[in-house]
Image (tube, grey):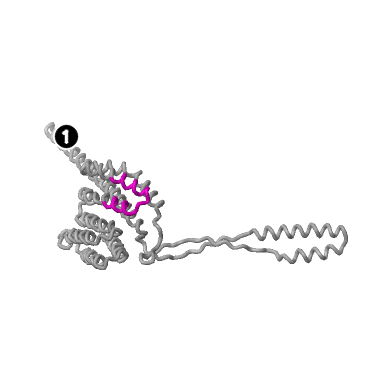
Amino acid sequence: MKKYKKFAYIFLILVIVVLSFTVYATVSKDTDKIEKEKRISEFEYLESELVDIFNELNNIQMSNYNVSVNNITSQTKKEDEGKSNSDSEKNQQGGQQSGASSSNSQNENQSSNTSSDSETKQQKEYTLKRNAILTNNEEINWDDIKNKIEIVYSSIPTITLDLYKYNINQDDILNFNKEFDNLTVVIKQNNKQDSLIQLSKLYDFMPKFAQSIYDDDLRKTIIETKSNILKAYSKLDTDNWNDISNDIKQASNAYSKLLTNPNIEQSKQYDISKIYVMINELQNAVQVQDKQIFLIKYKNILEEMNVIK
């Protein structure tokens, strides 16, 4: 009997150990998943903010339309101005007392009309405006860019700590933060070309970070491809079309790896091939050396990349 009790105790202990291990493994797995999702979210926030600043330097908006709201003010009148004058003439014929009454009545009517004249109605007019590149002649909104820079600064300490936890090269993290400071300096000076060059340097870190952040080849390759396209984008105002062409070739070579990658879902193959064609079409804009054609095709490529992820 004692022997059976001993086996029962041993069995119970084993069950408790196995259950404890299972619970621990499950909790640990869930915690790792949450941490990973957090870092991916932080990385994608940082990446999208850099791209947004790139776009704002050429007034590019990824949405095709904007809704603008205008306030319309109109004045209204409740009384006819001639009515008080007619009442005044009738009351004056009735004598002094009547005249005093008329005067009071006239003053009241005038006061009423004055109050009525000051009344206004507020209405709103909604206008749908297309965000087109060929018709975009707006100046750069430097204040908006500076505000965006300050907001990103508030997130950098948290993002930096999480990047350290992902075993990303510490020098790369420190250099990224340093280059972000350099970007702020040229943004403060409203210097477009230097801002584009500095943004390109910053985005060069994104493919390095993506290698540790993402598990799937699709997202890693898209970030690498974007980096090369944005290098070309940053040189548009310099008219250095030879360098721009080389950057587009690098983008095409990086992206072409997805065409033969067996790990990519079959359902995404059509969109992957479509983007590859669009990247190569950028070379046509380089051949005609037209900045606006380049920007139109660039915007379309980024829209497709945002969808395929």
**Quick one: quadrant of the N terminus?**
top left
> Is 242 located above or below residue 206 in the figure?
below
Name the residue rendered at 27%, 43% in the picture: 162
Q: Which residues are magenta?
A: 179-200
Q: Position of residue 158 (x, y in %)?
A: 31, 42
Name the residue rendered at 21%, 44% in the picture: 168
**Quick one: quadrant of the C terminus?**
bottom left
Horizontal relation, residue 68 to residue 62: left or right: right
Q: Position of residue 112 (x, y in %)?
A: 71, 59
Name the residue rendered at 29%, 64% in the picture: 294
Chief secondary structure of the magenta span? helix
Kindly identify which residue carries mark 1.
Answer: 9
Mark 1: amino acid: Tyr
Q: Position of residue 136 (x, y in %)?
A: 39, 64
Q: Secondary structure at mark 1?
A: helix
> Is residue 146 located in the magenta-colored stretch of the structure?
no
